[in-house]
Image (cartoon, grey):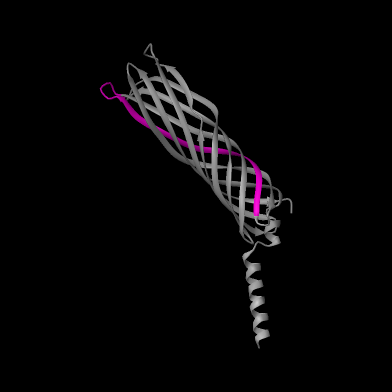
Amino acid sequence: MKKTMKKTLALGLMTSALLMSPSQDANAFVKGFYVGANGGVGYLKTRVNADYGANLTRRFDHAGIGATGGLHLGYGWMFAQSWYTGLEGSGALSSIKGDEDSVIDLANNTFEKTSSQERYNFALALKLGKVVADHCMVYLRLGARFANFRFTQQQYVLGGAVDSQTTLNKTKVGFEPGLGFAVKIADRWTFHGEYTHAWFSKQSFAKNNFNAAAADNYSMQPQVGRFLVGFTFHLGR
């Protein structure tokens, strides 16, 4: 009786250990080259600094949301049984845009509109993950995103002509950390979700008003947070 109980207890402990530790199947679903597609929504916030001369300056933000989607590819491998690392590149189209209408001179009905829109982007990232179950991994990503923005500034008189307008298309570089998860849904296929946030470098420019001799000086510095979901096909084992 005691031997039977000991055998039963030993079998139970072995079964629990196997269930709690990552299996070889967990190793298979993340190892090797992979390709995939993703999409989601993003939130843009841009800090605007405006210097109109004559000791008149303004600092404000404009913000907005939009859609984004693209492709990714990379290579990942396991180490120490349940840890994962990988390199990933991606590219996406984007309609994430923020804008703001504000008053410059209420007495003269002078208004200003600023906007920034992310048009497309490319990213490179290092991923470090931990397999927490046979079919699930959580990961941290650290990388850089290269995004092309359209910056627009416009001054106008309410109901009248435009006094000044500037439009710039510039590619900015941003540091981008993120968190995500991946779940195996079929042989060689995983579903993933992740959130990333990128802080981009500042863009400065000057614009001469149509009806003034002095130039207005501007700087815009965007940051973009995005939540993406997608599917990945794993080529390797």
Nearest the camera: 174 or 117?
Answer: 174
Residue that protrudes farthest toward the top in the picture? 213
Image coords of residue 46 (percent x, y): 44, 33
Residue that protrudes farthest toward the front in the picture? 2
Nearest the camera: 189 or 124?
Answer: 124
Count of marks overlaid on the render? 0
Residue that protrudes farthest toward the bottom in the picture? 1
**Quadrant of the image occupied by residue 70:** top right
Would residue 45 appear left or right of 128 to someone viewing this image?
left
Image coords of residue 14 (percent x, y): 66, 72
Residue shown at 64% from the left, 55% from the top: 190
Residue shown at 74% from the left, 51% from the top: 236
Instruction: Report the quarter where the N terminus lies.
Output: bottom right
Q: Main secondary structure of the magenta part?
A: strand
Image coords of residue 151 (percent x, y): 48, 28
- Whether 113 is among the magenta residues is no
Up/down of 119 relative to 11, above or below: above
Residue shown at 40% from the left, 34% from the top: 62
Nearest the camera: 190 or 11?
Answer: 11
Would residue 110 appear left or right of 80 to someone viewing this image?
left
Image coords of residue 81 (percent x, y): 68, 57
Residue shown at 54% from the left, 36% from the top: 175
Instruction: Report the quarter where the C terminus lies.
Output: bottom right
Up/down of 50 relative to 90, above or below: above
- Whether 87 is among the magenta residues is yes
Would residue 80 appear left or right of 108 to someone viewing this image?
right
Up/down of 57 relative to 73, above or below: above
Q: Which residues are magenta?
A: 83-109
